[in-house]
C-alpha cells in the first residue's frame, strides 16, 4: 500500500517533468500529437530519416523525435505509478476527437485485449500531459480526485 504522501509526491514529480518536457518540446508535441509519437516505432523513424523524408537532426529531426519518445516513455512510467488513483472518465472531456472516437469504438466492441488497453492508457496519459499539467486549476482538481480515490480505496470506516 502506498501512502497518500508518496502518491502525491509521484504526481508532483510527474508534473515538474511534464512542464519541463512541454517547455522543451512543446511545438513538436502539438504538431505531431503525443499518442502518435508514443505509438511510432523507433525503427520506422530511423527508416524515414534514411529515406530523407525527415532530417536526422534539427528541431523536427529523427534524433529529436527519438529523444522525445524516450522522455515520454519515462514520464509514462511515472504516470502509471499514480494513475490507479485516477478515473479515466474524469479525463474523457479532455481527449481529442479522434481519441474519443477510438475509445468509444473500443467500448462498443467490448474488446479487452492488451493492445487496446495500452492504447487507451496512452490516450489518458496524453490528455493529462496535454491539458491537465499546464493548467493549475485542472491540476489541483486532479490532485483532489487522487486524494479522494486514495481515501476510498485505503481508509475503511469502522462502525
Image (cartoon, rainbow, N blue to C red):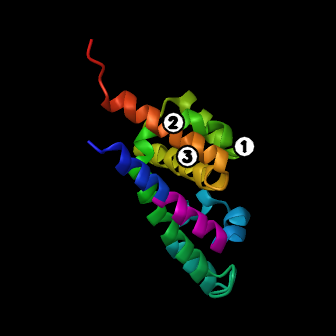
**Residue that label 2 marks:** 145
On-image quarter of the C terminus:
top left
Of badges 1 and 3, the one in the foreground is 3
> Which is nearer the N-term, disc 1 or disc 2?
1
Q: Name the magenta segment's main secondary structure.
A: helix
Element type at mark 2: helix
Q: Residue at x 48, y 56 (%)?
A: 12
Q: Residue at x 44, y 45 (%)?
A: 83
Q: How many marks?
A: 3
Give me the C-alpha separation between circle 3 and circle 2: 15 Å
> Which is nearer the N-term, disc 1 or disc 3?
1
69 w.r.t. 92: above or below: below
Is residue 154 on the magenta stretch? no
Say which mark, if any, is on residue 124: 3
Span colored in magenta: 13-24
- What is the x, y in percent for residue 53? 70, 80
Give me the C-alpha separation between circle 1 and circle 3: 13 Å
Q: Residue at x 65, y 55 (%)?
A: 130
Q: Is residue 57 left or right of residue 116?
A: right
The reply to whether discs 1 and 2 touch (Cβ–Cβ < 8 Å) is: no
Element type at mark 3: helix
Quadrant housing residue 150: top left
Amino acid at each position: 500500500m502506498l501512502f497518500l504522501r508518496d502518491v502525491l509526491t509521484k504526481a508532483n514529480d510527474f508534473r515538474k517533468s511534464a512542464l519541463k518536457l512541454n517547455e522543451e518540446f512543446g511545438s513538436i508535441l502539438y504538431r505531431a500529437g503525443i499518442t502518435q509519437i508514443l505509438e511510432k516505432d523507433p525503427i520506422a523513424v530511423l527508416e524515414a530519416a534514411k529515406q530523407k523524408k525527415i532530417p536526422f537532426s534539427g528541431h523536427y529531426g529523427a534524433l529529436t523525435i527519438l529523444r522525445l519518445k524516450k522522455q515520454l516513455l519515462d514520464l509514462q512510467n511515472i504516470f502509471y505509478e499514480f494513475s490507479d488513483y485516477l478515473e479515466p472518465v474524469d479525463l474523457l472531456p479532455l481527449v481529442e476527437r479522434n481519441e474519443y472516437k477510438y475509445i468509444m469504438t473500443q467500448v462498443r466492441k467490448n474488446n479487452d485485449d492488451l493492445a487496446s488497453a495500452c492504447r487507451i492508457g496512452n490516450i489518458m496519459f496524453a490528455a493529462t500531459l496535454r491539458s491537465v499539467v499546464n493548467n493549475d486549476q485542472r491540476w489541483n482538481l486532479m490532485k483532489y480526485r487522487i486524494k479522494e480515490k486514495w481515501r476510498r480505496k485505503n481508509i475503511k470506516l469502522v462502525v
